[in-house]
Amino acid sequence: MGFFNTIGHALWGTPLKVQALPTQLASPWAEPNNLMPAIVGELWDFPVELVTPEIALRVPEVNRALQAHQALVAPLKMSVYVDGEEAAEQPYWVSNTDSGIPRYICWTGTVKDLFLHGAAVLGAELDSFGSTVRDFIHVPAEHWEIDRETGRVVISDVIPAIYRQHAIYIPLGSNGLLVDGIDSVRQARKLELARQKRIDTPPAATELHITDVKYDEMTSEEREALAKSYAANRNKHAVAVTPSYMQVIDHNGQTVDLFENAKNSLRLELAQHAGLPASFLEAGKEGGSSGQMSYTNENGKASELWVFGSSRFAYAILARLSLDDVVGPNAEVRADLSDFMVPTPDQLSAESPVTAEAPEPPATEE
């Protein structure tokens, strides 16, 4: 057995056992996913916010990106092909499940784990021969880990035993957002907290500027009483009377900075990490405007969102399901991707030929 076969057997040919699972944290002190530790804790001398998947999804741009990928990948219809032809008899899992969990929900959770962690696991029931998969469910990220000693996938016993017969480990081939994009997620959280503080404590609309230095020794209680007296008088009357030592400065015309430029810049970063067109997150290029969202082509078929974003999750799932331990030799799993394919002019003419009929001659009076 070769080196790569040994690794494949370790990850996918998995007699399973149960161990305590670590908390899924993207932090300097814990692993951000099941694949790669974040070796950053000792490099920084300032506190770093712990980021769980739940906290990351509080960032609107992250949540929108995940929902977009799930919306494109989860509904895909899959079929098994043998020797290049669609199999006449499809495996049970293609259109059925005994779990009561729809395939749509299964793929929604799988895409979420791939998006956030860069890997996902399906817990599978084997067929009566024990050679291929009959049924499977999605195993949430908090219910599996990779044993450091054996390299095998370990599924928690909270998952029904029938779906712990075989672990289908699905790697994305790259890190998830909680590794590569963790700095941008933390920035988004800090920016949102700053925005909330600015909204909760806006700058004063009216400033009472005392011009006489003899009033500089006023106590805080005296200053507060003066401000309340002025505000109470303005609420009762449209005209205000001020002493000579007081200058009233009105700030009502000034806009409150809610860090829109910083927010836009952060959206650009998150769009790049999430595999989205910047316009999909309503982000504009630096110094420009967001413009119109144009992530679908004129035929409504192909999209930049699919080609450069969602497709990698779909292809990771299809590639893993096509291995022998799932569907057997000489077989592969394909999905109907026709909605994302741009037809060529030849295909358009073949599918919907345009014919021209000679116009009837105009009627003439006899």
Image: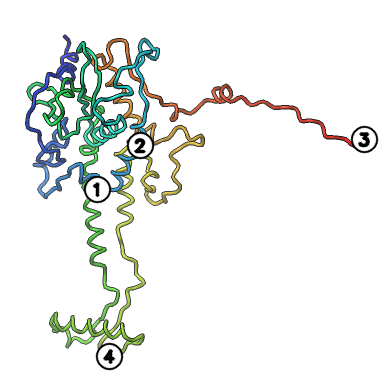
Q: Position of residue 126 (x, y in %)?
A: 21, 17
Q: What amino acid is labelled 4 in the image?
A: Ser
Spatial separation of the CA atoms under disc 3 and disc 4: 102 Å
Q: Please identify, in this view, whether the residue under mark 1 or under mark 2 is nearer the observer.
A: 2
Task: Confirm whether residue 184 shows in the render.
Answer: no
Q: Which badge, 3 or 2, is on the more N-terminal residue? A: 2
Spatial separation of the CA atoms under disc 4 and disc 1: 52 Å
Q: Which badge, 4 or 1, is on the more N-terminal residue? A: 1
Spatial separation of the CA atoms under disc 1 and disc 3: 80 Å
Q: Residue at x 29, y 48 (%)?
A: 60
Q: Name the residue under label 3.
A: 366
Q: Where is residue 25 in the image (x, y as percent from the top left)?
A: 14, 40
Q: Residue at x 26, y 84 (%)?
A: 230
**Which quadrant would the N terminus be assigned to in this image?**
top left
**At numbered mark 2, what does the secondary structure look like: helix, strand or loop?**
helix
Q: Which mark is residue 58?
A: 1
Examine the image and state in which quarter residue 92 appears. Answer: top left
Q: Residue 71 carries which label?
A: 2
Q: In this view, does 147 lie above or below 45?
A: above
Q: Which residue is drawn at 26% across and 70% down?
A: 203
Q: Is residue 40 above or below residue 230?
A: above
Q: Do callouts 1 and 3 mark residues in contact (Cβ within 8 Å)?
A: no
**At numbered mark 1, what does the secondary structure look like: helix, strand or loop?**
loop
Q: Mark 4 points at which residue?
A: 244
**At numbered mark 3, what does the secondary structure look like: helix, strand or loop?**
loop
Q: Which badge, 4 or 2, is on the more N-terminal residue? A: 2
Q: How crowded is mark 3: few (under 14 residues within 10 Å), some or many (20 or more)?
A: few
Colour scheme of the rendered structure: rainbow
Spatial separation of the CA atoms under disc 3 and disc 2: 65 Å
